[in-house]
Amino acid sequence: MAWSRVVLLSVVALLTLSASPVNAQTHHCGDIQLVFRNPDLQPGGDGKIHAQGQFFAQFQAIGAGADKIAVFGFSFSPLPVQTDESTTCAAPVWVSGAYIPNYRADLNPDDGFFIPLITPLVPDGEYNAAVHAYDANNNELARFWTLAVVDNCDDSAPGGRCDGDAAQNLKHDKTAPWPMILPGDGKPLEGHKLTIEFGEALASFSVHLNGKDVTAQMKEWPGRVWDADLTPDYGPNGLGGKLPQCTAPAPVQSCIKYGPAYEFTDRDLTSADTIHVEAVDLAGNKAVKDIHIGSSVDGGAITQGIPILVDSVETLEQQAEPGHSAVFKFTITNQGAGDGHPFADATVPGGWTFEWQPTHVVVGPGETKKQELVVNVPAGAAHGLYKVNATLNYRAGSEDKVLTQQLTVGVGASTAGEAAKASAQAASGAKASPLPLPFVALAFALLARRRRA
């Protein structure tokens, strides 16, 4: 096929090539932009991606023809030979030293493009890692490759492997548990309303639906099994040809459930729903993922030149003393193919003020921008929990889109009783107001003082 140079817009790098590190080792072929979605898999100061642990890697395709992608394949070379577009894109076969082509593949675009990875399966060292996009006839439509560093073992010598040492693997795990959320990342699974799958064991997780904590309503779900071996299983250059995943017995194929899975069964989701997921793995790495169902991209393929913005906030709750400020740190990512111009606003309790820093950001295709909402608490504010509604409004083609985050500012010491009352208010749609300390807590305080006297 005829290759042409394109501008790689990497959501993972949060940068365009013009803003990438001068020594960034990222390369690309084809007219379709292949984009990482994991926010922590980005080139570091050395221009290389440092990937350590077990996780789902999510990809997205942007540009005309992106909807023709039927398969995402993943390859790697244990010999990090420097190759660039001038020689590699013209070659019919991607060769970079000794390599394993298409040792992992995503054969179903309906649920988004995800590749499960377990880096301890390979020795420590540097690799060329590539993602390939194929159509239904095995034609390679696009390719992206980069230098990646794997360092799972305490032994500093390259070539070490410690996949059987759980303690070392946990110590060196640097990759957050990026979830797969359906619908949102793709179409809902048949027979399910909302499913969330993780690529590794978790220490904790939470789910908010339209700002309401529904973690307790998430039911454990058996989930699906995923490819977990080094056998090439798809692609015209793969040794395994079109070997279907998880059908042949071990040791040819090994398929496992990578991490916990949950489902929400209360109701079907609509285009107005937003989902906020936070998860922490056993090593303490944290993932935060927000999806607005109405702005999501089923299958991860974008063909129209319109912005598709997704926002996330570092935490939904902040504490602040009277006369001080609560700062909410936002991340805005453009998953579309046109410039996004989000206009930020907020509603706060009477007598309070707020400001966005910066006041306005422009988010180009594939870019991620940071913005902070500073909520100023009056000096005379009573202790309690206060609701803040943050909104980002932007234009997508002929439609007006609104992203909403329902936040909470805790002023002074909050109690479990206050939190329960705040949750009840949120569920009933009651107007936010300061929540006084419960009478029982005050009674205990007076009783303790009387005993001390």
Image (cartoon, helix red, strand yellow):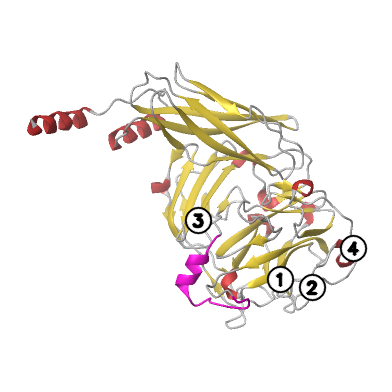
Q: Which mark is residue 285?
A: 3
The vertical placement of 142 against 323, above or below, is below
Q: Earlier in the sequence, mark 2 or mark 3?
A: 2
> Mark 3: which secondary structure?
loop
- In this view, the residue farthest toward the top is 351
The vertical placement of 379 against 202, above or below, is above
Q: Amino acid at mark 2?
A: Ser
Label 4 to label 2, Cα distance in Å?
14 Å
What is the tally of numbered marks visible in this picture? 4
For this rendering, which residue is in front, 17 or 220?
17
Give the residues in magenta.
157-174
169 in magenta: yes
Q: Earlier in the sequence, mark 4 or mark 1?
A: 1
Question: Quick one: label 3, few (<14), some, or many (20+) residues within 10 Å?
Answer: some
Look at mark 4 in the image and give the residue it sits on. Answer: 86
Is residue 9 visible from the viewing direction of this image?
Answer: yes
Label 4 to label 3, Cα distance in Å?
38 Å
Q: Residue at x 48, y 40 (%)?
A: 315
